[in-house]
Image (tube, rainbow, N blue to C red):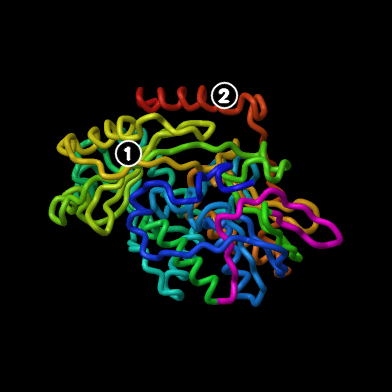
Protein backbone atom coordinates (compact mmCIF):
# COMPACT_ATOMS: atom_id res chain seq x y z
CA UNK A 1 0.00 0.00 0.00
CA UNK A 2 1.38 3.42 -0.94
CA UNK A 3 0.58 6.88 0.35
CA UNK A 4 -1.74 7.14 -2.66
CA UNK A 5 -4.22 4.97 -0.75
CA UNK A 6 -5.51 7.81 1.42
CA UNK A 7 -3.14 10.77 1.38
CA UNK A 8 -2.21 11.31 -2.25
CA UNK A 9 1.54 11.69 -2.38
CA UNK A 10 1.66 12.38 1.36
CA UNK A 11 2.07 16.13 0.93
CA UNK A 12 0.19 18.51 3.21
CA UNK A 13 -3.20 19.78 2.00
CA UNK A 14 -3.22 23.42 0.82
CA UNK A 15 -4.09 24.93 4.19
CA UNK A 16 -2.89 28.17 5.75
CA UNK A 17 -1.10 26.08 8.33
CA UNK A 18 0.90 24.15 5.76
CA UNK A 19 1.85 27.40 4.02
CA UNK A 20 3.04 28.98 7.28
CA UNK A 21 4.75 26.02 8.95
CA UNK A 22 8.09 26.90 10.52
CA UNK A 23 9.82 23.51 10.40
CA UNK A 24 10.60 21.72 7.14
CA UNK A 25 11.14 18.00 7.58
CA UNK A 26 12.95 15.59 5.28
CA UNK A 27 10.74 12.48 5.38
CA UNK A 28 12.38 9.11 5.98
CA UNK A 29 10.42 6.06 4.81
CA UNK A 30 10.38 2.79 6.68
CA UNK A 31 12.53 0.24 4.85
CA UNK A 32 13.32 -3.26 6.11
CA UNK A 33 12.95 -4.50 9.68
CA UNK A 34 13.29 -2.25 12.72
CA UNK A 35 12.98 -3.11 16.41
CA UNK A 36 11.85 -0.91 19.29
CA UNK A 37 10.34 -0.97 22.74
CA UNK A 38 7.28 0.93 21.49
CA UNK A 39 5.87 1.42 17.99
CA UNK A 40 3.27 4.14 17.52
CA UNK A 41 0.99 4.37 14.48
CA UNK A 42 0.05 7.94 13.55
CA UNK A 43 1.98 11.20 13.96
CA UNK A 44 -0.90 13.33 15.16
CA UNK A 45 -1.39 14.61 18.68
CA UNK A 46 -2.32 11.25 20.23
CA UNK A 47 0.65 9.48 18.70
CA UNK A 48 3.10 12.29 19.38
CA UNK A 49 1.93 12.75 22.99
CA UNK A 50 2.16 9.00 23.64
CA UNK A 51 5.56 8.75 22.00
CA UNK A 52 6.98 11.83 23.71
CA UNK A 53 5.80 10.81 27.17
CA UNK A 54 7.26 7.32 26.70
CA UNK A 55 10.56 8.65 25.32
CA UNK A 56 10.81 10.86 28.39
CA UNK A 57 10.52 7.68 30.48
CA UNK A 58 13.47 6.14 28.61
CA UNK A 59 11.72 3.87 26.10
CA UNK A 60 13.04 3.35 22.57
CA UNK A 61 10.14 4.68 20.48
CA UNK A 62 9.49 4.38 16.75
CA UNK A 63 6.61 6.31 15.21
CA UNK A 64 5.18 5.34 11.80
CA UNK A 65 3.11 7.85 9.81
CA UNK A 66 1.38 7.20 6.49
CA UNK A 67 1.72 10.78 5.23
CA UNK A 68 3.60 13.56 7.08
CA UNK A 69 3.76 14.66 10.71
CA UNK A 70 0.50 16.43 11.54
CA UNK A 71 -0.99 15.68 8.10
CA UNK A 72 -4.46 14.81 9.47
CA UNK A 73 -6.75 16.60 11.90
CA UNK A 74 -3.90 17.51 14.25
CA UNK A 75 -2.29 19.77 11.69
CA UNK A 76 -5.33 21.42 10.12
CA UNK A 77 -7.86 22.00 12.91
CA UNK A 78 -9.15 25.25 14.36
CA UNK A 79 -6.14 25.58 16.63
CA UNK A 80 -8.38 26.04 19.67
CA UNK A 81 -7.26 24.73 23.05
CA UNK A 82 -10.72 23.90 24.40
CA UNK A 83 -11.05 22.09 27.72
CA UNK A 84 -13.45 19.20 28.12
CA UNK A 85 -14.80 16.38 26.00
CA UNK A 86 -17.51 16.67 23.37
CA UNK A 87 -19.90 14.97 25.80
CA UNK A 88 -20.61 17.27 28.75
CA UNK A 89 -19.94 16.40 32.35
CA UNK A 90 -23.71 16.26 32.85
CA UNK A 91 -23.99 13.67 30.08
CA UNK A 92 -21.11 11.64 31.49
CA UNK A 93 -22.69 11.73 34.96
CA UNK A 94 -26.05 10.62 33.58
CA UNK A 95 -24.58 7.76 31.55
CA UNK A 96 -21.77 6.51 33.75
CA UNK A 97 -22.46 7.78 37.27
CA UNK A 98 -21.04 10.27 39.77
CA UNK A 99 -17.71 8.52 40.22
CA UNK A 100 -16.87 8.60 36.51
CA UNK A 101 -18.01 12.21 36.21
CA UNK A 102 -15.78 13.20 39.14
CA UNK A 103 -12.87 11.34 37.57
CA UNK A 104 -13.34 13.09 34.20
CA UNK A 105 -13.96 16.44 35.85
CA UNK A 106 -10.65 16.15 37.66
CA UNK A 107 -8.59 15.77 34.49
CA UNK A 108 -10.25 17.60 31.59
CA UNK A 109 -8.01 20.63 32.02
CA UNK A 110 -4.90 18.46 32.07
CA UNK A 111 -4.54 18.27 28.29
CA UNK A 112 -4.12 22.03 27.99
CA UNK A 113 -1.48 21.87 30.71
CA UNK A 114 0.42 19.20 28.77
CA UNK A 115 0.43 21.41 25.68
CA UNK A 116 1.76 24.39 27.63
CA UNK A 117 4.39 22.20 29.27
CA UNK A 118 5.61 20.80 25.93
CA UNK A 119 5.70 24.28 24.39
CA UNK A 120 7.69 25.64 27.31
CA UNK A 121 10.14 22.77 27.88
CA UNK A 122 10.86 22.06 24.22
CA UNK A 123 10.76 25.68 23.03
CA UNK A 124 8.03 25.03 20.46
CA UNK A 125 7.17 28.08 18.34
CA UNK A 126 3.42 27.75 17.69
CA UNK A 127 1.96 31.17 18.60
CA UNK A 128 0.31 29.84 21.77
CA UNK A 129 -2.16 32.34 23.28
CA UNK A 130 -4.46 32.25 26.31
CA UNK A 131 -8.24 32.36 26.53
CA UNK A 132 -11.20 31.08 24.55
CA UNK A 133 -14.77 32.32 24.44
CA UNK A 134 -18.01 30.36 24.19
CA UNK A 135 -20.48 32.65 22.39
CA UNK A 136 -24.27 32.44 22.82
CA UNK A 137 -26.89 33.64 20.35
CA UNK A 138 -29.90 33.34 22.66
CA UNK A 139 -30.86 33.70 26.30
CA UNK A 140 -31.53 29.96 26.37
CA UNK A 141 -27.90 29.36 25.37
CA UNK A 142 -26.77 31.82 28.04
CA UNK A 143 -28.68 29.75 30.59
CA UNK A 144 -26.76 26.70 29.39
CA UNK A 145 -23.47 28.57 29.89
CA UNK A 146 -24.47 29.60 33.41
CA UNK A 147 -25.26 25.96 34.14
CA UNK A 148 -21.91 24.91 32.69
CA UNK A 149 -20.04 27.41 34.86
CA UNK A 150 -21.81 26.14 37.97
CA UNK A 151 -21.23 22.51 37.02
CA UNK A 152 -17.51 22.99 36.39
CA UNK A 153 -17.17 24.80 39.71
CA UNK A 154 -18.58 21.73 41.45
CA UNK A 155 -15.69 19.76 39.98
CA UNK A 156 -13.09 22.28 41.13
CA UNK A 157 -12.74 24.35 37.99
CA UNK A 158 -13.27 28.08 38.38
CA UNK A 159 -11.67 29.63 35.31
CA UNK A 160 -14.93 30.71 33.63
CA UNK A 161 -16.16 34.30 33.39
CA UNK A 162 -19.69 35.03 32.17
CA UNK A 163 -20.20 37.90 29.72
CA UNK A 164 -23.41 39.78 28.99
CA UNK A 165 -24.26 41.27 25.59
CA UNK A 166 -22.29 44.44 26.29
CA UNK A 167 -19.26 42.69 27.77
CA UNK A 168 -18.86 40.22 24.93
CA UNK A 169 -18.50 43.11 22.48
CA UNK A 170 -15.31 44.05 24.30
CA UNK A 171 -13.91 40.75 23.00
CA UNK A 172 -15.75 40.22 19.68
CA UNK A 173 -16.43 43.02 17.19
CA UNK A 174 -19.89 41.74 16.32
CA UNK A 175 -23.44 42.44 17.45
CA UNK A 176 -24.88 38.94 16.86
CA UNK A 177 -24.26 37.46 20.31
CA UNK A 178 -26.47 37.67 23.40
CA UNK A 179 -23.46 37.00 25.62
CA UNK A 180 -20.91 34.32 26.32
CA UNK A 181 -18.33 32.90 28.69
CA UNK A 182 -14.54 33.04 28.77
CA UNK A 183 -12.49 30.01 29.72
CA UNK A 184 -9.29 31.64 30.91
CA UNK A 185 -7.53 28.26 30.99
CA UNK A 186 -8.20 27.66 27.27
CA UNK A 187 -6.38 29.23 24.35
CA UNK A 188 -5.27 28.80 20.76
CA UNK A 189 -2.17 28.14 18.67
CA UNK A 190 -0.83 27.12 15.24
CA UNK A 191 -1.73 23.42 15.27
CA UNK A 192 0.66 22.16 12.61
CA UNK A 193 3.63 23.97 14.15
CA UNK A 194 2.74 22.34 17.47
CA UNK A 195 2.92 18.86 15.91
CA UNK A 196 6.17 19.67 14.15
CA UNK A 197 7.69 20.98 17.37
CA UNK A 198 6.58 17.87 19.25
CA UNK A 199 8.11 15.67 16.55
CA UNK A 200 11.40 17.52 16.85
CA UNK A 201 11.23 17.11 20.65
CA UNK A 202 10.67 13.36 20.25
CA UNK A 203 13.67 13.06 17.97
CA UNK A 204 15.80 15.02 20.44
CA UNK A 205 15.10 12.22 22.94
CA UNK A 206 16.15 9.50 20.52
CA UNK A 207 12.73 8.74 19.04
CA UNK A 208 12.61 7.77 15.36
CA UNK A 209 9.87 8.90 12.96
CA UNK A 210 9.12 7.27 9.63
CA UNK A 211 6.85 9.26 7.29
CA UNK A 212 5.20 8.49 3.94
CA UNK A 213 4.90 4.91 5.20
CA UNK A 214 1.21 3.87 5.29
CA UNK A 215 0.59 1.00 7.67
CA UNK A 216 -0.98 -2.10 6.11
CA UNK A 217 -1.37 -4.20 9.24
CA UNK A 218 -0.96 -4.41 12.99
CA UNK A 219 -0.50 -7.92 14.40
CA UNK A 220 0.70 -9.53 17.61
CA UNK A 221 2.27 -12.86 18.44
CA UNK A 222 4.61 -14.28 21.07
CA UNK A 223 4.24 -11.20 23.26
CA UNK A 224 5.33 -8.82 20.49
CA UNK A 225 3.50 -6.40 18.22
CA UNK A 226 4.35 -5.95 14.55
CA UNK A 227 3.45 -2.93 12.46
CA UNK A 228 3.79 -3.59 8.73
CA UNK A 229 4.11 -1.24 5.76
CA UNK A 230 4.64 -1.91 2.07
CA UNK A 231 8.42 -1.85 2.43
CA UNK A 232 9.14 -2.68 6.04
CA UNK A 233 7.99 -3.54 9.50
CA UNK A 234 8.58 -2.58 13.12
CA UNK A 235 8.66 -5.25 15.80
CA UNK A 236 8.15 -3.95 19.33
CA UNK A 237 7.04 -5.01 22.79
CA UNK A 238 4.00 -2.76 22.49
CA UNK A 239 2.10 -0.97 19.71
CA UNK A 240 -0.10 2.11 20.09
CA UNK A 241 -2.62 2.76 17.31
CA UNK A 242 -3.55 6.43 16.89
CA UNK A 243 -4.81 6.63 13.30
CA UNK A 244 -8.13 8.14 14.39
CA UNK A 245 -10.17 9.29 11.35
CA UNK A 246 -7.49 8.16 8.90
CA UNK A 247 -6.90 4.61 10.13
CA UNK A 248 -9.25 3.10 7.56
CA UNK A 249 -9.57 -0.68 7.88
CA UNK A 250 -5.98 -1.30 8.98
CA UNK A 251 -7.21 -2.60 12.34
CA UNK A 252 -10.63 -4.15 11.55
CA UNK A 253 -11.64 -4.34 15.22
CA UNK A 254 -11.59 -0.53 15.38
CA UNK A 255 -13.23 0.38 12.09
CA UNK A 256 -16.84 0.38 13.24
CA UNK A 257 -16.15 2.23 16.48
CA UNK A 258 -15.83 5.69 14.90
CA UNK A 259 -16.91 7.56 11.80
CA UNK A 260 -14.87 10.12 9.86
CA UNK A 261 -16.53 13.54 9.77
CA UNK A 262 -15.30 16.41 7.62
CA UNK A 263 -15.17 19.99 8.83
CA UNK A 264 -14.15 23.01 6.77
CA UNK A 265 -12.03 26.09 7.31
CA UNK A 266 -11.02 29.27 5.50
CA UNK A 267 -8.34 31.88 6.13
CA UNK A 268 -8.66 35.44 4.88
CA UNK A 269 -5.98 37.62 3.41
CA UNK A 270 -3.89 39.45 6.05
CA UNK A 271 -6.17 42.15 7.45
CA UNK A 272 -3.55 44.28 9.12
CA UNK A 273 -3.13 44.65 12.85
CA UNK A 274 -5.72 47.39 13.37
CA UNK A 275 -8.50 45.69 11.41
CA UNK A 276 -7.79 42.29 12.95
CA UNK A 277 -7.76 43.73 16.47
CA UNK A 278 -11.17 45.28 15.82
CA UNK A 279 -12.55 41.78 15.17
CA UNK A 280 -11.10 40.20 18.32
CA UNK A 281 -9.74 43.01 20.53
CA UNK A 282 -8.47 40.74 23.32
CA UNK A 283 -6.96 38.14 21.01
CA UNK A 284 -8.99 35.19 22.25
CA UNK A 285 -10.46 32.46 20.08
CA UNK A 286 -14.21 31.94 19.80
CA UNK A 287 -16.64 29.09 19.30
CA UNK A 288 -20.40 29.37 19.54
CA UNK A 289 -22.49 26.91 21.53
CA UNK A 290 -24.80 25.57 18.82
CA UNK A 291 -24.82 21.91 17.81
CA UNK A 292 -23.46 22.80 14.34
CA UNK A 293 -21.07 25.46 15.51
CA UNK A 294 -18.76 28.11 14.06
CA UNK A 295 -15.29 28.74 15.45
CA UNK A 296 -12.77 31.46 14.65
CA UNK A 297 -9.66 33.27 15.72
CA UNK A 298 -7.02 35.69 14.41
CA UNK A 299 -3.67 34.28 13.34
CA UNK A 300 -0.27 35.69 14.22
CA UNK A 301 -0.11 37.45 10.84
CA UNK A 302 -3.58 39.01 11.37
CA UNK A 303 -5.77 36.77 9.22
CA UNK A 304 -9.20 35.67 10.33
CA UNK A 305 -9.33 31.87 10.45
CA UNK A 306 -12.95 30.73 10.39
CA UNK A 307 -14.33 27.19 10.46
CA UNK A 308 -17.50 25.20 10.83
CA UNK A 309 -19.87 22.80 9.14
CA UNK A 310 -19.80 19.02 9.09
CA UNK A 311 -20.08 16.34 6.41
CA UNK A 312 -20.68 12.88 7.86
CA UNK A 313 -18.68 10.12 6.24
CA UNK A 314 -15.64 12.33 5.73
CA UNK A 315 -16.25 13.62 2.19
CA UNK A 316 -15.25 17.15 1.22
CA UNK A 317 -17.77 19.71 -0.08
CA UNK A 318 -17.29 20.83 -3.66
CA UNK A 319 -16.71 24.47 -2.65
CA UNK A 320 -15.43 25.10 0.87
CA UNK A 321 -15.51 28.90 0.50
CA UNK A 322 -19.15 28.85 -0.62
CA UNK A 323 -20.04 26.70 2.38
CA UNK A 324 -18.20 28.70 5.06
CA UNK A 325 -18.19 32.34 3.85
CA UNK A 326 -21.91 32.91 4.65
CA UNK A 327 -21.26 31.91 8.25
CA UNK A 328 -18.35 34.34 8.45
CA UNK A 329 -20.46 37.15 6.98
CA UNK A 330 -23.27 36.47 9.45
CA UNK A 331 -20.85 37.27 12.31
CA UNK A 332 -18.83 39.96 10.53
CA UNK A 333 -21.00 41.52 7.76
CA UNK A 334 -18.34 44.08 6.89
CA UNK A 335 -16.06 41.25 5.72
CA UNK A 336 -18.45 40.21 2.93
CA UNK A 337 -15.93 41.09 0.23
CA UNK A 338 -12.74 40.07 2.01
CA UNK A 339 -10.39 37.90 -0.05
CA UNK A 340 -10.05 34.28 1.05
CA UNK A 341 -6.47 33.08 0.61
CA UNK A 342 -6.87 29.49 1.86
CA UNK A 343 -9.72 26.97 2.10
CA UNK A 344 -9.41 23.39 3.27
CA UNK A 345 -11.16 20.43 4.88
CA UNK A 346 -10.12 17.74 7.33
CA UNK A 347 -11.62 14.75 9.07
CA UNK A 348 -12.07 14.11 12.75
CA UNK A 349 -13.24 10.80 14.21
CA UNK A 350 -16.71 10.85 15.74
CA UNK A 351 -17.77 8.31 18.34
CA UNK A 352 -21.52 7.76 18.71
CA UNK A 353 -21.40 8.60 22.43
CA UNK A 354 -19.19 11.69 21.79
CA UNK A 355 -16.82 10.26 24.42
CA UNK A 356 -13.31 9.35 23.19
CA UNK A 357 -12.31 5.72 23.42
CA UNK A 358 -9.21 4.10 24.83
CA UNK A 359 -8.49 0.41 25.08
CA UNK A 360 -6.31 -2.59 24.40
CA UNK A 361 -6.49 -5.36 21.80
CA UNK A 362 -4.89 -8.50 23.17
CA UNK A 363 -1.85 -7.90 25.34
CA UNK A 364 0.37 -5.83 23.08
CA UNK A 365 -1.78 -3.33 21.15
CA UNK A 366 -3.27 -0.18 22.70
CA UNK A 367 -5.42 2.42 20.94
CA UNK A 368 -7.06 5.82 21.42
CA UNK A 369 -9.48 7.60 19.09
CA UNK A 370 -12.91 9.21 18.72
CA UNK A 371 -12.37 12.69 20.19
CA UNK A 372 -15.41 13.90 18.25
CA UNK A 373 -14.12 17.37 17.40
CA UNK A 374 -12.54 18.08 20.82
CA UNK A 375 -9.24 16.37 20.20
CA UNK A 376 -6.56 19.02 20.71
CA UNK A 377 -6.53 18.69 24.51
CA UNK A 378 -8.06 15.22 24.81
CA UNK A 379 -5.46 13.63 22.56
CA UNK A 380 -2.58 15.04 24.60
CA UNK A 381 -4.22 13.76 27.78
CA UNK A 382 -4.87 10.31 26.32
CA UNK A 383 -1.27 10.12 25.15
CA UNK A 384 -0.12 10.65 28.72
CA UNK A 385 -2.58 8.08 30.08
CA UNK A 386 -1.45 5.50 27.49
CA UNK A 387 2.15 6.10 28.53
CA UNK A 388 1.22 5.59 32.19
CA UNK A 389 -0.48 2.27 31.39
CA UNK A 390 2.44 0.96 29.36
CA UNK A 391 4.82 2.04 32.12
CA UNK A 392 2.81 0.04 34.66
CA UNK A 393 0.18 2.38 36.13
CA UNK A 394 -3.16 1.20 34.71
CA UNK A 395 -5.37 3.30 37.00
CA UNK A 396 -6.55 6.02 34.64
CA UNK A 397 -6.37 3.81 31.55
CA UNK A 398 -8.64 1.19 33.12
CA UNK A 399 -11.27 3.80 33.97
CA UNK A 400 -11.54 4.98 30.37
CA UNK A 401 -11.17 1.52 28.88
CA UNK A 402 -14.10 0.29 30.98
CA UNK A 403 -16.54 2.82 29.49
CA UNK A 404 -18.83 1.03 27.04
CA UNK A 405 -18.69 2.13 23.42
CA UNK A 406 -21.96 2.49 21.54
CA UNK A 407 -22.23 1.34 17.90
CA UNK A 408 -23.71 3.69 15.31
CA UNK A 409 -27.32 2.87 14.41
CA UNK A 410 -27.40 0.99 11.13
CA UNK A 411 -23.81 -0.17 11.44
CA UNK A 412 -21.08 0.94 9.03
CA UNK A 413 -23.39 1.11 6.00
CA UNK A 414 -25.98 3.49 7.44
CA UNK A 415 -23.99 5.36 10.08
CA UNK A 416 -23.45 8.43 7.85
CA UNK A 417 -27.11 8.75 6.71
CA UNK A 418 -28.41 8.30 10.25
CA UNK A 419 -25.93 10.83 11.61
CA UNK A 420 -26.81 13.29 8.83
CA UNK A 421 -30.48 13.01 9.78
CA UNK A 422 -29.66 13.64 13.43
CA UNK A 423 -27.45 16.57 12.46
CA UNK A 424 -30.29 18.07 10.40
CA UNK A 425 -32.62 17.84 13.40
CA UNK A 426 -30.20 19.55 15.78
CA UNK A 427 -29.38 22.21 13.18
CA UNK A 428 -33.10 22.93 12.89
CA UNK A 429 -33.29 23.29 16.68
CA UNK A 430 -30.34 25.72 16.51
CA UNK A 431 -32.11 27.74 13.83
CA UNK A 432 -35.40 27.86 15.75
CA UNK A 433 -33.70 28.57 19.05
CA UNK A 434 -35.16 25.45 20.68
> How far from the left and from the top, in percent, is residue 11?
46, 51
Q: Is residue 334 left or right of residue 425?
A: left
Q: Is residue 130 magenta?
A: no
Q: Nearer the viewer, residue 48 or 7?
A: 7
Q: How many marks?
A: 2
Residue 318: name its quadrant. Answer: top left
> How far from the left and from the top, in percent, is residue 244?
58, 47
Please state which of the two labelled residues, at mark 2 or mark 1, is closer to the viewer: 2
Q: Is residue 151 left or right of residue 95?
A: left
Quadrant location, the C terminus:
top left
Q: Secondary structure under badge 1?
A: strand
Above or below for 142 versus 318: below
Reading the image, the residue beneath label 1 is 136
Badge 1 density bin: few <14, some 14–19, many ≥20, Cα 10 Å: many
Residue at x 39% of width, y 48% of height: 78
Q: Is residue 21 left or right of residue 408?
A: left
Q: Is residue 216 left or right of residue 79?
A: right
Residue at x 32% of width, y 39% of height: 136
Q: Is residue 206 magenta?
A: yes
> How far from the left and from the top, in percent, is residue 81?
41, 55
How far apart in space, not on screen, are marks 2 and 1 (Cα)?
28 Å
Res 86 visible: no
Residue at x 49% of width, y 66% of height: 198
> How far from the left and from the top, in percent, is residue 279?
20, 48
Q: Secondary structure under badge 2?
A: helix
The magenta segment: 205-228
Reading the image, the residue beneath label 2 is 418
Q: Can you tell which mark lies on residue 170?
A: none
Q: Farthest residue in the left direction?
A: 274
Amino acid sequence: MSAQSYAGDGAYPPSYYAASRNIERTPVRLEGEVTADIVVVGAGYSGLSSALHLAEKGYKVVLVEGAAVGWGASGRNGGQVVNGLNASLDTIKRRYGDQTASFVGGLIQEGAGIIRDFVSRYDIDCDLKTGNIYAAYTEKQMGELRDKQALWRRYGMDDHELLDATQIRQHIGSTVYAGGMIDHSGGHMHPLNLTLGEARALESLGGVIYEHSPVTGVTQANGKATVTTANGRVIADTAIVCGNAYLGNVVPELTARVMPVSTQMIATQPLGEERANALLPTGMCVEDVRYILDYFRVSADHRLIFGGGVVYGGTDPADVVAKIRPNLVKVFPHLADVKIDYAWSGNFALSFSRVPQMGRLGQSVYFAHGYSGHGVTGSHLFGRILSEAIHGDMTRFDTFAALPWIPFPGGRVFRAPYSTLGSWWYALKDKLGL
